[in-house]
Amino acid sequence: MLLTIESTCDETAAAVIDDDGRVLGDCVATQETLHEKFQGVVPEIAARAHLERILPVIQTAMQKASVSSADLTAIAVADRPGLAGSLLVGVVAAKTLSLAWDKPLVAINHLHAHLYACQLATPTPVYPCIGLVVSGGHTSLYHCTSPLDLDYLGGTIDDAAGEAFDKVAAMLSLGFPGGPAVSKLAATGNRKAFQFPRSMLNKDNFDFSFSGLKTAVRYAITGPGQTDFSKLEIADDVKADVCASFEAAVVDVLVGKARKAVAKHRVNRLIVGGGVAANGYLREQLQQAATKHGFEVIIAPMDLCTDNAVMGAIALQKIRRGEFADLTLDITPGLQR
Ligand code: KG4
Ligand code: ZN
């Protein structure tokens, strides 16, 4: 029985998972209200909040599962990538419990775990496949031959898709995190109202760029040069059109590139994980592309798109391979692949 710990960004999470991958108890404490007024995650605040929450969250997950430390066979923790201070809290907690309870330690790559959430959604193996991670910090494509064997094909060269959602939401004073708010408003808008760029869609690689799109949205709202969005009065229907056109541009690029990767690598399956995978329009367009082009798409279940510790079940795969960490485990914040 496994205890998994997740603290890569602004969610503190823990789960207890049995050897067959069944979730016996889990707990997620979000920090949304702490970061809301800054319209983005403030690393220092995130780290301090993790520190306050990590032990109660672990305790809650274990209580829900009705297990004690004696029942655990390993402790797993996401050690990469993420915010340094946030990662440190989870890794130090996991190492301390590993030492105190004499349990083996397993290190998890958070991006691989986001994709593993797709495998948790279906009893049949999803590999080999193309994996698309779309989160607040990453937008990456992989060729995956197993949960742990991922070949990086490309990723964002500037902003991540989720980051673009959050920044557009901030420009329109829609709150934080921006993805759900932009998505809600987009559903009422016209996706063709603004012609926003589909950057790198037709480039012959698997990289992404969303910063030009963000700038195009800014100019559409304010005109060049204006930076103080708080003083702008934007009509609700214009906001909806901006959101709808922006969302269409992001989704076109994500779907287009993922589809090309599926074709190039001759696989017939695409798996999609990370916070932005919760986006309804993206889910719908992925399904449509899959039907049209004859491949299967498996998107992480809604409750496992944003950060959670259940996807830490990927640690069972590492245990099967005998891949354990030890007390020298350190964080790797900047990993892009
Ligand atoms: O995977 P995640 O929880 O954290 C990271 O690992 O970064 O992703 C968070 C990101 C945020 O940028 C948030 O705005 C975005 O996922 N997000 C969405 C939606 N729900 C969350 N973006 C678009 N549409 C959504 N429905
Ligand atoms: Zn994440």
Image: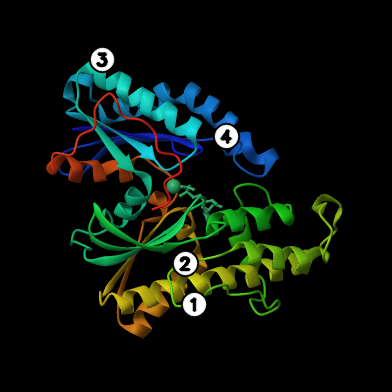
Foreground residue among 3 and 254:
254
> What's the residue at 37%, 45% (across, down)?
110
Q: Earlier in the sequence, mark 1 or mark 3?
A: 3
Q: How many other residues sit within 10 Å of disc 1, few (<14), some (14-19) or many (≥20)?
A: few
Q: How many other residues sit within 10 Å of disc 3, few (<14), some (14-19) or many (≥20)?
A: few
Residue that carries the numbered disc 3 in the rendered image: 100
Say how many tags the image has: 4
**How far across and down, in percent of the image, does residue 329 sit?**
31, 29
Foreground residue among 250 and 57:
250
3D distance between C-alphas at marks 1 and 3: 52 Å
Q: Secondary structure at mark 1?
A: loop
User: Tag 1: residue type?
Assistant: Lys
In the rendered view, how is the structure colored?
A: rainbow
Dot label at residue 203:
1
Task: Please state which of the two labelled residues, at mark 3 or mark 2, is closer to the viewer.
Answer: 2
Q: Earlier in the sequence, mark 3 or mark 4?
A: 4
Horizontal side of 146 relative to 222 (left or right) equals left
Task: Please state which of the two labelled residues, at mark 2 or mark 4, is closer to the viewer.
Answer: 2
Q: Secondary structure at mark 3?
A: helix
> What's the residue at 67%, 48% (across, down)?
175
Q: Disc 1, disc 2: CB below 8 Å?
A: yes
3D distance between C-alphas at marks 3 and 4: 28 Å
Q: Disc 3, disc 4: CB below 8 Å?
A: no
Residue that carries the numbered disc 4 in the rendered image: 43
Farthest-out residue, bottom? 292
Residue 180 position by quadrant: bottom right
Dot label at residue 207:
2
User: Tag 4: residue type?
Assistant: Pro
User: Tag 2: residue type?
Assistant: Asp
Dot label at residue 230:
none
